[in-house]
Image (spheres, rainbow, N blue to C red):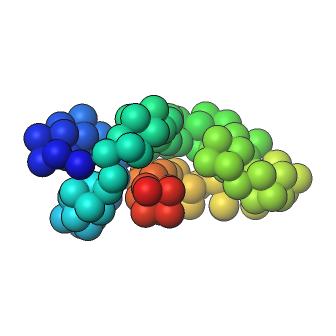
Amino acid sequence: MDKSKVDQFIMVNADKFPDYAQMQIREKLEKMDESRESMLMATPWKSPMATFLLAFILGSFGADRFYMGQIGLGILKLLTCGGLLIWGIIDWFTAFGRAKKHNLNMLMMRF
C-alpha cells in the first residue's frame, strides 16, 4: 500500500487502535497488497467510545459484550446482572482498551 495512504489511514483511525501498535500497523499496511485496500477502508472498526457508553449505560445487560461480538460473555453478563455489578464496573475501566485491542486483532488477522 502506498505510504501516503498508510499515513492517511493511521491519521483517520488512530483513536481506534492502541498507541503502542502504531509501528506494527504501519508495517502491516505497507506490506499489504493494493487489492485489499478497498476491503480495509470498508471495514467497520469498533468505536472505543461506543463500547464505553454501552458498558456504562447498559453494562449490567451485557450490551458492550454483544457490541464487541462476545455473545457468550454478553449472555453470561446479562444472566448475572453484570456479575452482581462488579463485572459491569470493571468493564467501565477496560472498555476503551478492549475495543482498541479488538480492532488491532481484526486488522492483523484479516489483512
Query: What's the residue at 50%, 36% (across, down)?
Result: 44
Q: Is residue 41 visible?
A: yes
Q: Residue furthest left?
A: 4
The structure residue drawn at horizontal position 64% and vertical position 41%, both measured from the top left corner, is 67
Q: Position of residue 100 (x, y in %)?
A: 41, 54
Q: Position of residue 60 (x, y in %)?
A: 72, 46
| Residue 36 placement: quadrant | top left
User: What residue is drawn where x is 45% and y is 39%?
Assistant: 39
Quadrant of residue 12 in the image?
A: top left
Vertically, is 96 above or below 43? below
What is the residue that sits farthest to the right in this orientation? 79
**Position above or below: 109 against 40:** below
Q: Quadrant of the C terminus?
A: bottom left
Residue 67 versus residue 11: which sits nearer the camera?
11
- State the image coordinates of residue 11 (x, y, percent, origin top left): 18, 40
Image coords of residue 101 (percent x, y): 44, 60
Q: Count numbered badges in the picture.
A: 0
Residue 36 is left or right of residue 67, and the answer is: left
In screen coordinates, is 4 left or right of 63?
left
| Residue 59 appears in the picture as rendered | no
Residue at x 24%, y 40% (from the top left corner): 9
The correct choice, above or below, for 42 with respect to 80 in the image is: above
> 69 or 98, which lies in front?
69
